[in-house]
Structure formats: C-alpha cells, structure tokens
Amino acid sequence: MKQYNVGIIGATGMVGQRFATLLSGHPWFNIVALAASSRSAGKTYKDAVGAKWKLQTPMPKELEDVIIMDAENDIEKIGEMVDFVFCAVNMSKEATAALEEKYAKADIPVVSNNSAHRHTKDVPMVVPELNPEHLDIIPAQKKRLGTTRGFIAVKSNCSLQSYVPPLFPLHEKYGVEDVLVCTYQAISGAGKTFEDWPEILDNVIPYIGGEEEKSEKEPLKIWGKVEGDEIVPATEPHFTAQCLRVPVSDGHLAAVFVRFKNKPTKEEILDCWKNFSAKPQELKLPMAPEHFLNYFEEDDQPQTKEKRNLEKGMAVSMGRLREDTQYDYKFVCVSHNTLRGAAGGAVELAELLAAEGYFD
Ligand SMILES: NC(=O)c1ccc[n+]([C@@H]2O[C@H](COP(=O)([O-])OP(=O)(O)OC[C@H]3O[C@@H](n4cnc5c(N)ncnc54)[C@H](OP(=O)(O)O)[C@@H]3O)[C@@H](O)[C@H]2O)c1
C-alpha cells in the first residue's frame, strides 16, 4: 500500500493525543506535521502538551521533539508537507468550519472529528461500516470549493456509534420505525479525566450540552442518500434520546428500545448481527475490527469497562436483547468513545479514503 504523509491539527488536545498514538507505527500513514493554537506553536510536542497528556500510554518517543506548527497561520507550509490532515480542535463552530474550509481550499484533504461540518450538505459524515457510499459526494464538494484535491470528510458524534451500528442492518431488513435511547457517557467525551473532574465521582450529571439533538439528528444523515450535489437525510427511523454523563473514564453505553415495521424474531436479530460484515472488513483496513458487531449472552454484559477495548476499541458490543412491553425489543450496547467514537473512527475513515484513492 502507498504511504501517505499526514498532519494532526489540534495535536495537543485529547483527541489529537489519540491520533498521535494510533498513527505512530501505522502501516500506511506517517505523521510529518503537528499543529495547535498559537499558544503551543514553536514549542516541542512534549513541552506544549506538558501535564495535559491524558492517555495511559505514553507520548510516542519519535514525536516528543517535533515542533508544533500554528494551525491557523502555517496552512501553506503544512500543505507542502502532507497528503492530508486529521482535525480535532476546540474552537467555536464558526471558527472550526472556516479553518477546515481553509485547509480544503488549500488543496489539503481534511478528515475531521469536529462537528462544525456534520450537516454541510455536500460533506460526507461516514461510519465506514455503514455508509461508505456517501464518499461519492466528494467530487461535488470539490467542485463547490474549486479544489483539485481538497475536501472535508467527517465522522459522526461518539454517542451514536454505540446504538446506530446494531440498528443499521436491522433497519435494512425489517424497517426500524421508532427508537428510544438513553446514553451513559464517559467523561473523556468532555475531554476530562478523574484527576481534573473529581466532582463526577459518585455522581451522574443528567445533561450534556447539545448531545441529545446530535444523537437524534445525526443518524438520519448516516441513513441519507446522495442525490445530485447533496446528501439528503432520511426521515426515519424516529429517534428520541436522553444523554447522561456518568463516572466512567472511557466508553459510552446505550440502553435502546426499538419498534419495527416488520417485527423480527430474536433469532433473526442475532443472526443479522452475527453475519454483519462491511467494506472495511472486505478491504481489510488496518484499523477495522474483524467483527464489528458482537453479541454477549451473559445477563450482566456488555459492561463498559470490560468491553470498551474489544478489537482495539473499534468494535461494538451488545447484550440483554429481549422483548419489551411497549416497544418490540430492548437491548444494551457499548463502544469506546475516543477510539471507535473519535480518533479511531477517523483513522478508519482515512484508511477507507486512501484505499478508494481519494488522497491521490
Ligand atoms: N473528547 C472526545 O471524546 C471527542 C469525541 C468526538 C469529538 N470530539 C471533538 O474533537 C474536537 C477536539 O476535542 P478535544 O477533546 O481533543 O479538545 P481539547 O483537548 O480541548 O483540544 C483542543 C485542541 O484544539 C487546539 N486549539 C484550540 N484553539 C485553537 C485555535 N484557535 N487554533 C488552533 N488550534 C486550537 C488546542 O491547541 P492548544 O493546546 O494549543 O490550546 C488543542 O490542540 C472537538 O471539536 C470535540 O468536540 C471530541
């Protein structure tokens, strides 16, 4: 496979740190540029991050002395070094959208973790196992931007990556009508650890700003269709969500209630999950899990702490599937929010883009 030079924009942040560790030693991607705000620019990666390193695994040795570039003012220089960039910055929605568009217009493809462009009509929001065909919109986006190589592709919010994957093959076969979901989300989703958020211990916070709206709206874009120069969102399934912050370091769990147009048997649902395989598995993308959807029979599974790291944190674990008195079925599912739900999902998306020739 061809090698690609990559940059990480927002390298000093929590998701940026995940990118750095995931990409260190990646078989296709070589990190050649790290960028962050002007506060960090000019410092070594080690000095810029300092005590803000949030992962259990240490900073990759080969990146410690890399000089951080200025994400907003060094775009041209970065463009000369990289084939594409990953972007995970903590800026306002407007500033993030503008920054990503500047990179794309400088002919630097952007694979983004940010939410700013998730609902831009010609920006694909892709979970590689679910809607890889949305990449077909990229030529239309390039035409609008006036670019030869530059475009923006985004991944979806972390919460839905636990409950949309198991619903996806079921919707195709049996028509999912209504979904009620409650998510129990880890503190790393807020960029926090227990050290810097002690108030979360022994506590549940019943509010995550903007999360319920994203959890109800984003699945419809994933189920949308490319029509002409836009992705038209689906109008069903209907989602209603409550999102809670719980004292867990990593891993989002979701409790799901689902109603079908054509109610399957429990065995048919389990079969659908067991046999699900998609393009990333077919292409053997390095980051892709061998089995994306995994069902556990034990009554007390899937537990967040036990299952979040399944298949390098890229698999989804389900359990407790049973009939419900008001909906057809209910079940519980878990995925790793900063791996499958953030940096890992973006790396897998970049692998799909590379395999399909979008960076050439
Ligand atoms: N944490 C998660 O689980 C998660 C999951 C999915 C998506 N996301 C999204 O990913 C993005 C990053 O999240 P995070 O948790 O990694 O945030 P973070 O830890 O606060 O890191 C933010 C990064 O943005 C940089 N930055 C801030 N202001 C900037 C500016 N004006 N110009 C250029 N760079 C700037 C920071 O650089 P300095 O260090 O120099 O300030 C840092 O590298 C956000 O959009 C977030 O919503 C996060």
Image (cartoon, helix red, strand yellow):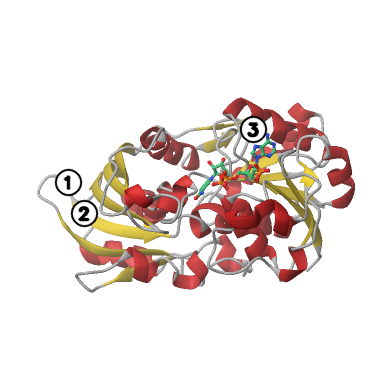
Q: Earlier in the sequence, mark 2 or mark 3?
A: 3
Q: Which mark is residue 96?
A: 3
Q: Amino acid at mark 2?
A: Lys
Disc 2 marks which residue? 330
In the picture, residue 62 is in which quadrant? bottom right
Q: Amino acid at mark 1?
A: Tyr
Where is the N terminus found, in terms of image quarters?
Answer: bottom right
In the picture, residue 326 is in which quadrant? top left
Q: Amino acid at mark 3?
A: Thr
Q: Residues within 10 Å of mark 3 (few under 14, many from 20)?
A: some
Residue at point 64% right, 32% down?
96
Q: Earlier in the sequence, mark 3 or mark 1?
A: 3
Residue at point 74% right, 63% down?
64
Disc 1 marks which residue? 327
> In front here: 246 or 98?
246
Q: Is residue 103 visible?
A: yes
Q: Quadrant of ligand 1?
A: top right
Kindly indicate whether the residue at mark 1 contacts the one at mark 2 (C-beta within 8 angstroms). yes
Q: Position of residue 3 (x, y in %)?
A: 81, 64
